[in-house]
Amino acid sequence: MLDLPDQVRPLLRQMSSLYATPVLTVAPTGNPLPLDTLIARAERRFPDGRLAWIETPARATAAIRINLARPGEPSRRFPRTNVWLDPYSGRILAVRDGLAESGGDVLLNWLHPLHGGEVFGMAGRLLALLAGLSPIALFVTGLLRWRRRRPRRRHG
C-alpha cells in the first residue's frame, strides 16, 4: 500500500470513501501574515493539537497548510489533522479532522507508523529494526548451512 498508492487507493475507494485534499487558491493581497499568527489560528481550531509541521506555499496564490498532531492519531510525524489558511487574511479555508476519518483513511493513516514502528514507541522502532535485519540474518544462516551440507571435493 505504501509502494503502490495509485493502484491501492482505487481498490480502497470501492469499500470506503477516502479523503481528497482540497485544491485551494487565494488572491494575494499584500504581505503574508506572520507564521505565528497562522499557527495560532490553526491551534484555536484544534486546541488539543500540537504543531507537527507547516507546508508553506510554493506559489503566491496557494494556501498554507498547518499540520497538527492530536492525541489519538497514530502518527506524530505524519498527522492527518490539517488546517488550510489564506496566508494573507488568515481565514481558514478548509480543515481535515484526523480523528473523524473514514475506515479507508484510518487504514492508510496507520501505514507509516506501523511501517516505521512509531506507533509503539521505542519498542516498536526496535521491532521494525529487527524485522528489517532479519532477511540478512536468514541469508547468512542459510548460506552457512548450505556450505556445511555441501559435499566437499577431494583433491588427489
Image (spheres, rainbow, N blue to C red):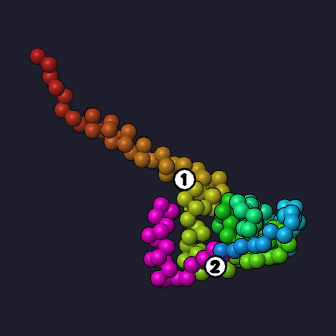
Q: What residue is drawn where x is 42% and y is 43%?
A: 136
Q: Between disc 2 and disc 1, whose residue precedes?
A: 2
Residue that carries the numbered disc 1 in the rendered image: 128
Does the rendering let one see residue 47? Answer: no
User: x, y (%) of residue 63?
Assistant: 74, 69
**How far apart are labels 2 and 1 at the CA level?**
26 Å
Does the rendering let one see residue 63? Answer: yes
Judge from the rendering whether residue 64 lies leftward or rightward of residue 44; answer left or right. left
User: x, y (%) of residue 8?
Assistant: 46, 71
Badge 1 amino acid: Ala
User: x, y (%) of residue 118?
Assistant: 63, 58
* Residue 117: quadrant of the picture: bottom right
Q: What residue is drawn where x is 58% and y is 67%?
A: 110
Front residue of this view, candidates 132 and 64: 64
4 inside magenta stretch: yes
Q: Nearer the viewer, mark 2 or mark 1?
A: 2
Question: What crowding class fits label 1: few (fewer than 14 Cα within 10 Å), some (14-19), or many (20 or more)?
Answer: some
* Residue 123: quadrant of the picture: bottom right
Q: Secondary structure at mark 1?
A: helix
Q: Which residues are magenta?
A: 1-22
Residue 101 image label:
2
Give the farthest residue toward the left.
Answer: 156
The quarter of the rendered structure image containing the C terminus is top left
User: x, y (%) of residue 141?
Assistant: 36, 40
101 to 32, vertically: above or below: below
Badge 2 amino acid: Glu
62 inside magenta stretch: no
